[in-house]
Image (spheres, coloured by chain):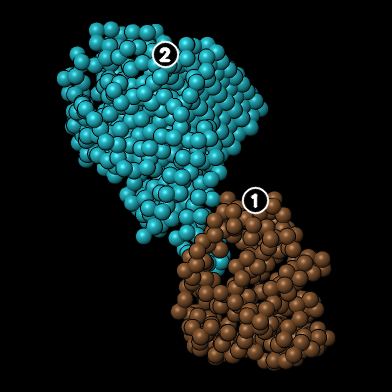
Amino acid sequence: MDEKTAQRFIERYEEARSALPGAGGWLARRREAALESFREAGLPHRRLEDWKYTDLRQTLEKAAFASAPAHEGAVVLPGRRSASAFAAIDRHVLVFVNGRYRTDLSQVVRLPKGVELHALADVVHEQWAKDLVERRFDDARQAENIVDLNTALMSDGACLRIRKGVKLDKPLHLLFFSADAGASHTRNLVFLENEAEATILETHVGEVASFADIVTDIAIGEGARLNHVKLQDEASDAVHLATMRARLAAEAKLSSFTLTLGCGVSRGQSFVLFSGEGAEANIDGAYALRDKQHADQFCVIDHAVPACTSHTLFKGVLDGKSVGVFQGKVIVRPHAQKSDGRQMTHALLLSRDAAMNAKPELEIYADDVQCAHGSTVGELSKEAIFYLRSRGIPEAEARRLLVLAFLEEVLDLAPHNQAKDALKLLVSEWFGEAAP
Amino acid sequence: MLEIKNLHVTVGGKEILKGIDLDIRAGEVHAIMGPNGSGKSTLSYVLAGRDGYVVTEGSIRFKGKDLLEMNVDERAAAGVFLAFQYPLEIPGVTTMTFLKTALNAQRKARGEEELDAVRFLKLVREKSRPLNVSDDMLKRSLNVGYSGGEKKRAEVLQMSLLEPALAVLDETDSGLDIDALKTVAEGVNALRSPERAMVVITHYQRLLDYIVPDVVHVLSQGRIVKTGGKDLALELEKSGYVEYGADAA
C-alpha cells in the first residue's frame, strides 16, 4: 500500500483512536476491521467501474486535507442563501460545525415522547446503532467500500430513533457547516420503528477547502415513512462525499430529494434495499453546476423482495466547464415479481465545455416486472429562445425561464412543500448569479 | 413606419430575397402573397431578427431607426411583433408567466413601470375574453397540448397584450377551420388602428376575406412582382401563381 493519502488517513486513525466514540467496545473492533479493509482497497480511482467518472484518489491527493479543527465559540454562517434556505420552516435544528455537534447552536425543543435524538457518541452502546453501522448492502462493493473510511474515522453525527407509531412533530434540520478547512467524518443513524414518521432536512454549506465524508444509515420499519430533503452548496475547493444506505421493511416509504449546487468535487451515493413487500422508494435529485464543478450521483436500488416500487429521477443543468455524472442501477432479484422500478436522468448542457456522463442500468432476474430506464443529454432549444426573445424577453431571462422550466418537474418531487419552494427560489437565483 | 429598401437575404449561403422594396405606413394593412418557397417566411424572420438570416444588401428602417442594428428582444420592445406560423411549445413555462415576463420586459426596456400581479391579471383577463382564451389555457404550459386554433388565438392574445406598432402575421390561417379563422381574424381586426401597421403573409386569399388589406403584394422567387389593391388577391385566387413563375399548385 504505497498510497500517500490513504496512509495519512490511517495515521490519523492511529492518532485519534482513543478519542473516537466507542473506544474499548464493539465499535473499536469494528473500526479496526474497517481500517484493515480500507488499507487493502485504498482510495477509489477511475479504473474501478463504479468510480469510472470520478477519481476520488486523485482529488484527495491533490487537496491533501488535514483534519478539520474543533471550532469553539460563535460562527458566522456564509452569506450564500443556501445557508438560510430552510430558516423560515418551523423545525428542530441540529448544527454541526467542522463535523462536530454544537449543542449551543442547536435548537431542539420538546421532542414528542418516543423520539430520541442524540449525538453519535451517546448511542454507540445501543444495539440498534450497532445493527445499522455493521450492515452492508454489497450491491456495488466498489462504491460501498469507501464507507470503511468513514467507519474507521467517524467522530460525530445525528442519531434519530423514533418509536413505533410516533410521528416527529416538525422537520428535523441537520445543518452542516464547514467553518475551517480540513476533513471531517460524520455518521448519521436513522431508525424509524414500524408506523413511525419523520421529515429530515439536511444542508451542507461552507466557503472553505473542506472534505466532508458523510454516511447516513437508515432503517425504516413496516409502514413507516421518511421524507428527506438535502441541499448541498459548498466551496469550489471543497470535496463532498455522501453515502446514504437505507433498508425498507414492508409497506415502508422513503422519499429522498437532493439539490446539488455543488462544490469542487461532490459524489452522492444512495443504496436502497427493499426487505419487505409493498415498500416504495423515491430517490430524486436536481443539480445546477458551473465553472469547474464536478458532481457525481450514484444510485443502486435492490428489489430483493416482490411488489416494491422505486422511482429515480435526476435532472440537472451544466454551465461553464462543469462535469455531471449519473451512475445508477436497479436490481430485481429472481423472486421479486411485481416490482416496479424506474430510473431516469436528463441533463441540459448550457455551455460547449460542460459534459455529462450518464450510465443507468437495469439488472432484472424476474419476469413479471415493470422496469424502465433512460437518459438524455441536450441543450436549450435555439427556437424556444428565439420565440421568447421575439416577445421582448432578453436572452438571459429567456434562458433562465427555460432552465427553471426544465428543473421544475424534478423539484416538484421534493417531499416537503416549504422546502420545495425554498429550493425553487435557490435555483432561480442560481441562474441569476450565473448571468454575466 | 417600415421602409425596406433593396433587401437581399441569404439563408445557408443561398439567396432567398433578391431585392425587396416595401414602404408601409402607420394604419395600413399590407398582404404579402406568394407561392411556397417565394421567400414570405424569410421576410418575416428577417424582420423579427432570427439567427441565420443574413442581410447581404439593403436596409430596413422601422420608425426611422435602423432595424438591423437591433437584436431580437430590442426589436420586440421597439414594437415589432411576429405571429408565428408554428408557435413553439414551451413545457414548464405557463402561458401566464410567459405573458407577464414578456410584457414587463418590454415595459422595462421602454423605461415604463412594470405591472404588478393584480394589474396584470386584470389586463390579461380583459384581453383574453374576446379571444375565448380560458383561465385554464392561461395556467397551462405555453402552447403545450393546445389545438391549432388555440395556438393561433394565443398568438393573437400576445399581440393584443403587447400592442406592437408593427404586427407581422405569418400564415396565421394555416391549420385553421373556418370558425377558428373567424375568431382569429376578429381578434386581428380589433387591433387595427391608425397608429399600427400590419403585414399579413399568406398563401391563400381566404384569410383576406376576413382581414381586408389596403395593399396586396405578390412575392415570387425573392422579388415583389406585382402590387395592387385588395382586388389583386381575388385575381390570384382565380388564376393562381403560375403567371408569376410558380408551378401550378
Q: At numbered mark 2, what does the secondary structure look like: helix, strand or loop? A: strand
Q: Color of chain B here? A: brown
Q: Quadrant of residue A76?
A: top left
Amino acid bearing label 1: Lys
Residue ID at (47%, 11%): A113
Residue A275: x percent and y percent? 53, 18
Residue ID at (41%, 10%): A128
Quarter of the image where the N terminus of chain B is located: bottom right
Instruction: Kindly tell me whether residue B84 is visible in this rendering.
Output: no
Residue B172: x percent and y percent? 70, 71
Q: Are marks 2 and 1 in contact (CB under 8 Å)?
A: no
Determine which residue is flagged by label 2: A116
Q: Is residue A291 above or below residue A215?
A: below
Work out whether residue B109 or residue A355 is closer to the camera in this orientation and state it.
B109
Q: Quadrant of residue B229?
A: bottom right
C-alpha gap between disc 2 and disc 1: 45 Å
Q: Color of chain A here? A: cyan
Determine which residue is flagged by label 1: B139
Q: Is residue A353 above or below residue B184?
A: above
Residue ID at (57%, 26%): A280
Q: Is residue A203 left or right of residue B45?
A: left
Q: Quadrant of residue B219?
A: bottom right
In which chain is the residue bearing label 1?
Answer: B
Callout 2: few (<14), some (14-19), or many (20+) C-alpha neighbours within 10 Å?
some
Amino acid bearing label 2: Glu
Work out whether residue B76 or residue A135 is closer to the camera in this orientation and state it.
B76
Instruction: Return the mark for residue B194.
Output: none
Residue A278: x percent and y percent? 61, 21
Q: At numbered mark 1, what does the secondary structure look like: helix, strand or loop? A: helix
